[in-house]
Each structure stands twice: as C-alpha cells, then as structure tokens.
C-alpha cells in the first residue's frame, strides 16, 4: 500500500512536505485524485469558468452543482456523483433556490441530490478570501465534498486590484489552500474583460491579471457565438488531454451542447446576429393546431432560434392578430373574408 510521507518540521515553525528522491516517487508514487468531471476536473484541483456579462455563468455553475450532486452529465461530460458546496456571494437565497428548482426539473434530477448539494449564502458577508475561506473550511471540517463552487470570485477581492498579479495571486492561493485542505475541487466564476473577445486567445479573455490564465488547473471560457444565445466553449487543461472546442446553446434554464454550430464562428463587433422571422413560426405551426411547448420546441430545433426570440416573434404575430389560442392550442387565425370564399 502506498503511503505519503508526513510533513516535516522546518525552522520558523512551518510544516512542509518531505523532500523525496525520484526513486521514492517511482516506488511510492502518490495516487492521482479521482475525476469529478470526466476528462475535465479532478478532486483537489481548481477550475475557473469565464464568460462575458449576462452569459449565464451562474446558471451554468448551478447546473454543474446539481449535475454532480445528482450524478447527471454536465454539458455532456460524465460526472462522478458526490457532495457539493455552493458558496453564493451574489444572489439572494430565495432567487437562487428558485433557479436550482428549475434546473433540477429540466434535468430530471431526483431527490437524491437534495442532501448532496449544500448552499452557503454569503451575500452581504463577502470579504478577503484569505480570511473568509478558512472560516468556511472550519464550518465543513470533517465533511467530504467533491466540489466547492465559489460564485463570483471578484467578491473576494475586498479592495484588492484585479489587475495586480500579487493581489490575484493572493486570492488564488487562498482558493488553492481550500482545495488542498478539503480535497475538493474548487470551481469559481470570473468575468471577461471589455472589448472584442474574438480577437484574443481564449485564456486571455478573463478580466484582470494574467494569473487567472496561468493558475487554475482547468480553464473553461464561454465566448459569444454569432448564433443567438450560443457560446463557444474552450478548455485549457493542465492534467488532461486536450478537449476540442464545442458550442452550447441556452435552452431555458440550462446550456445544452449544439453540435450543429461551428465553434470558430465567434460573434465579432459590427457583425449582426442571424435573424429569424415570424414566417419561421408560421411555417412550423402549419395549418393545424399545436400546444405551445411543442410548437416552440419544434420551431427552435428546426431553425436554431432561441426561445427568447420565439417569444418575441410570437408576440409580433399576436399584435397583428395572425394567430390565436383555442382550447389551449395555437393555430393560424382564419380571416373571416377568406373563410367566406
């Protein structure tokens, strides 16, 4: 059985791991930690999810939390079911709870996740992570968590400069200590810088010091695609083989993989997003009657439009009285004069 040498006492009272020879590492190599997200994240590692403003980062992190807690794939990546702690620094508990319920319903996550997922609501209690996270660690001492999610990470700056390598290094060191001391993977959300993201390398899109692009073991960034409500996902991995870029599309209330989109087609300044028209809705409605969910799903899948755009175009059809609802089903509205003919 492999054993890990105990820490060695050093001058000054610090406790550092023992120095080992290569021979010792070969004969008594520590085991690699188990994977939490297959091909993407190990326990004890750090992961950042970066994206622009209003890119559904918190929804995606909540989806990740429920997926691990319930043993469901996340963005088609298989997961190892385990306990999750979500540290919410931004959203009021009632609203966050409502989001979790919507996601759980959409993914058919059973009651088994109810106890696996714990939420620590710290809105109004944010502060320097070097002081806050040790308090969190003390609260969960003795408990085995697979993942700890911190959202958003900027709440831990506490007056520090996000463009300072030293300040961001301090922030990420506090996160690393939490990962090492708990054995859990620590995942946090970060926002993009301003400007044209398509012109930057994926790891350089996160705002602030470049330490954000060098420190985490797993860097996942969501960049706006030219298709509406869609994003190209790039992953930079330290301990896994490369993952090819792929696309996700917002289908309320979760992101879902969309294999019909080209990851290279990023949204660029001045380039208009593809447009959809009321005719697309009418074509998919046909001459019969349909329940709204079926009509919406069929139209969005056939055309690639988002649910948000569907709702807008449907309102436009209602404004011109082109459609009507009868007994819970929608149909094209018949012009009385045409009916007489």
Image: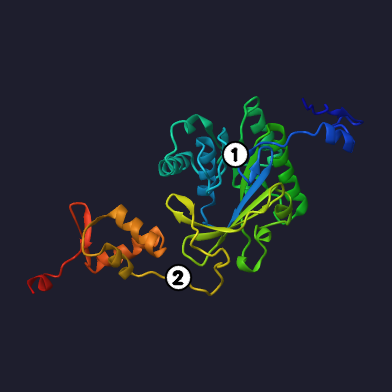
In this rendering, position of residue 252 left or right of residue 24: left
- As drawn, which residue projects farthest toward the right? 11
In this rendering, position of residue 64 left or right of residue 242: left
Residue 149, picture quadrant = top right
Is residue 20 visible in the rendered image? The answer is no
x and y percent of residue 118 in the render?
Answer: 53, 33
Compare marks 1 and 2 and give the one earlier in the sequence. 1
Number of numbered discs present? 2
Secondary-structure class at tag 2: loop
- Check whether the beta carbons of the residues at disc 1 and disc 2 lie within 8 A of each other: no
Nearer to us in this view, 96 or 278? 278
Nearer to us in this view, 330 or 312? 330
From the image, tell me which residue sits under label 1: 125
From the image, tell me which residue sits under label 2: 274
Quadrant for the N terminus in the image: top right
Secondary-structure class at tag 1: loop
Q: Report the residue at 61% width, 43% height from top.
A: 38
Q: How is the image coloured?
A: rainbow
Residue 335, picture quadrant = bottom left
x and y percent of residue 30 in the render?
Answer: 77, 33
Quadrant for the C terminus in the image: bottom left
Badge 2, how many Cα within 10 Å: few under 14, some, many 20+? few
């Amino acid at each position: 059985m492999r054993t890990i040498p105990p820490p060695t006492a050093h001058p000054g009272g610090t406790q550092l791991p023992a120095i080992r020879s290569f021979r010792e590492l070969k004969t008594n190599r520590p085991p690699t930690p188990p994977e939490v997200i297959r091909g993407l994240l190990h326990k004890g590692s750090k992961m950042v999810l970066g994206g622009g403003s209003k890119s559904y980062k918190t929804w995606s992190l909540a989806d990740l939390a429920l997926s691990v807690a319930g043993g469901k794939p996340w963005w088609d990546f298989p997961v190892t079911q385990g306990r999750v702690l979500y540290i919410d620094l931004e959203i009021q508990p009632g609203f966050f709870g409502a989001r979790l319920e919507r996601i759980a319903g959409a993914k058919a996550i059973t009651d088994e996740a109810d106890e696996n997922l714990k939420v620590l609501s710290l809105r109004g209690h944010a502060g320097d992570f070097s002081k806050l996270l040790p308090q969190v660690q003390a609260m969960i001492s003795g408990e085995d968590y697979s993942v700890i999610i911190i959202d958003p990470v900027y709440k831990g700056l506490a007056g520090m400069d996000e463009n300072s390598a030293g300040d961001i290094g301090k922030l990420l060191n506090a996160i690393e200590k939490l990962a090492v001391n708990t054995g859990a993977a620590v995942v946090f959300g970060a926002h993009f810088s301003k400007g044209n993201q398509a012109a930057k390398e994926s790891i350089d899109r996160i705002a602030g010091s470049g330490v954000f692009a060098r420190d985490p073991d797993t860097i996942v960034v969501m960049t706006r695609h030219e298709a509406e409500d869609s994003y190209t996902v790039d992953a930079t991995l330290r301990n896994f083989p490369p993952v090819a870029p792929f696309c996700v599309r917002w289908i309320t209330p979760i992101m879902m993989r969309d294999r019909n989109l080209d990851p290279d087609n990023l949204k660029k300044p001045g380039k208009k997003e593809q447009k959809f028209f009321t005719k697309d809705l009418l074509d998919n409605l046909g001459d019969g009657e349909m329940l709204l969910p079926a009509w919406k799903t069929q139209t969005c899948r056939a055309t690639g439009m988002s649910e948000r755009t569907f709702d807008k175009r449907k309102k436009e059809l209602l404004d011109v009285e082109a459609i009507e609802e009868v007994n819970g089903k929608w149909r094209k509205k018949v012009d009385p004069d045409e009916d007489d003919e």
